[in-house]
């Protein structure tokens, strides 16, 4: 499966990455779902992010849910990377 190219999230928007090391290649739909999941963190803190029902949240479902995350690769790895970036100091 081909991807949409190297993409990073800048200011909450997916942008093509021009150069540098790519940690994950995301499709635009995957970027949307990551933003929706991060939005759950903004609303409910760590509890919102760790909620086992996170994929049932309306915002997450509207972004494509788990299927949109699968498009970008391994969901567990994508979520772990998103969490690492959110909590990076």
Image (tube, helix red, strand yellow):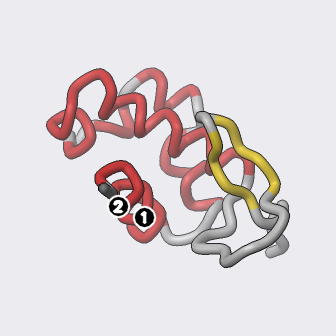
Q: Nearer the viewer, residue 34 or 75?
A: 34
Q: In the displayed structure, does residue 26 sit left or right of residue 83? A: right
The residue at the far left in this view is 47
- The residue at 60%/49% (across/down) is 68
Q: Which residue is mark 2?
A: 84
The residue at the far front in this view is 89
- The residue at 77%/47% (across/down) is 15
Query: Looking at the rendered structure, which numbered label has been put on residue 81?
Result: 1
Of the 4 image quadrants, the one containing the C terminus is bottom left
Q: In the displayed structure, does residue 45 sit left or right of residue 24? A: left
- The residue at 15%/36% (across/down) is 47
Q: Real-space Cα distance between discs 1 and 2?
A: 5 Å
- Residue 87 position, x and y percent, is 29, 52
Query: Looking at the rendered structure, which numbered label has been put on residue 3?
Result: none
- For residue 2, above or below residue 84: below
- For residue 21, above or below residue 7: below
Could you classify mark 1 by the number of other residues whose Cα lies within 10 Å: few (under 14), some (14-19), or many (20 or more)? some
- Residue 86 position, x and y percent, is 36, 49
Badge 1 marks a residue whose secondary structure is helix
Q: Quadrant of residue 72?
A: bottom right
Q: Quadrant of residue 10?
A: top right
Callout count: 2
- Residue 42 position, x and y percent, is 33, 27
- The residue at 34%/55% (across/down) is 83
Of the 4 image quadrants, the one containing the N terminus is bottom right
Q: In the displayed structure, does residue 33 sit left or right of residue 5? A: left
Q: In the displayed structure, does residue 14 sit left or right of residue 38? A: right
Could you classify mark 2 by the number of other residues whose Cα lies within 10 Å: few (under 14), some (14-19), or many (20 or more)? few
Label pair 1/2, CB-CB below 8 angstroms: yes
- Residue 71 position, x and y percent, is 65, 60
């Amino acid at each position: 499966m081909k991807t949409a190219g190297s993409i990073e999230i800048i200011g909450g928007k997916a942008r093509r990455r021009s150069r540098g090391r790519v940690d994950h290649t995301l499709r635009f739909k995957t970027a949307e779902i990551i933003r929706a999941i991060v939005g759950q963190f903004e609303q409910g803190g760590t509890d919102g992010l760790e909620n086992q029902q996170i994929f049932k949240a309306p915002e997450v479902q509207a972004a494509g849910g788990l299927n949109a995350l699968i498009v970008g690769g391994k969901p567990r790895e994508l979520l772990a990377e998103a969490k690492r970036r959110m909590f990076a100091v």
